[in-house]
Amino acid sequence: MKKIKLKTILFVVISLLVNYAQAQQTNANLLQEDLKYLKTTIHTKYSNLFYNITAEDWDKQADELNKQLPSMSNEQALAGFVKLIALFHIGHTG
């Protein structure tokens, strides 16, 4: 009886850990998709924003954020997005 309970508890704990890891990866993937959408939108609809920073320099910063997103918390990711937008130094962005 104890072996069955222990196996069941172990199975549940492992399942929770796997689900947690998958959720973290899914969240990072969603954030990376959001960043990709932001980059595309900025370049196609708001290219006039690139007068205090070049498109190439902004893209480098965006690519760096993209690399870091999988290891960031939601709060850190949000701060990263804010900093990326602030690089335009227009009005209230920077």
Image: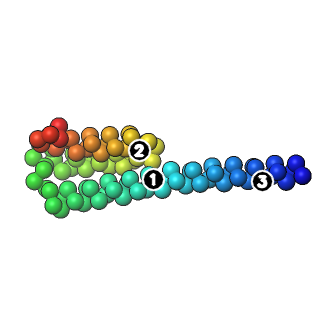
Mark-to-mark CA distance, 2 and 1: 9 Å
Q: Secondary structure at mark 2?
A: helix
Mark-to-mark CA distance, 1 and 3: 28 Å
For the residue marked with disc 2, what is the amino acid?
Asn
Q: Nearer the viewer, residue 93 or 57?
A: 93
Q: Earlier in the sequence, mark 2 or mark 1?
A: 1
Residue 27 visible to the viewer: yes
Q: Which residue corresponds to the image point at 69% horizontal and 49% vertical from the top-left?
A: 13
Q: Which residue is mark 3?
A: 8
Pointer 2 with pointer 1, Cβ within 8 A:
yes
Reply above or below: 6 against 94.
below
**Neighbourhood count class around disc 3 (C-alpha, 10 Å): few under 14, some 14–19, many 20 upward:** few
Q: Secondary structure at mark 1?
A: helix
Q: Nearer the viewer, residue 62 or 79?
A: 79
**At which x and y percent is residue 69?**
40, 47
Residue 31 relative to residue 86: left or right? right
Residue 54 relative to residue 84: left or right? left
Mark-to-mark CA distance, 2 and 3: 32 Å
For the residue marked with disc 3, what is the amino acid?
Thr
Q: In the current view of this chain or complex, which residue is farthest to the right? A: 1
Residue 92 relative to residue 35: left or right? left
Q: Which residue is mark 2?
A: 74
Q: Which residue corresponds to the image point at 88% horizontal and 48% vertical from the top-left?
A: 2
* Residue 27: image tag: 1
For the residue marked with disc 1, what is the amino acid?
Asn
Q: Which residue corresponds to the image point at 17% horizontal and 41% vertical from the top-left?
A: 93
**Closer to the eye: label 2 or 3:** 3
**At which x and y percent is residue 72?**
43, 42
Q: Earlier in the sequence, mark 2 or mark 3?
A: 3
Residue 68 visible to the viewer: no
**At which x and y percent is residue 8?**
78, 53
Residue 66 relative to residue 43: left or right? right
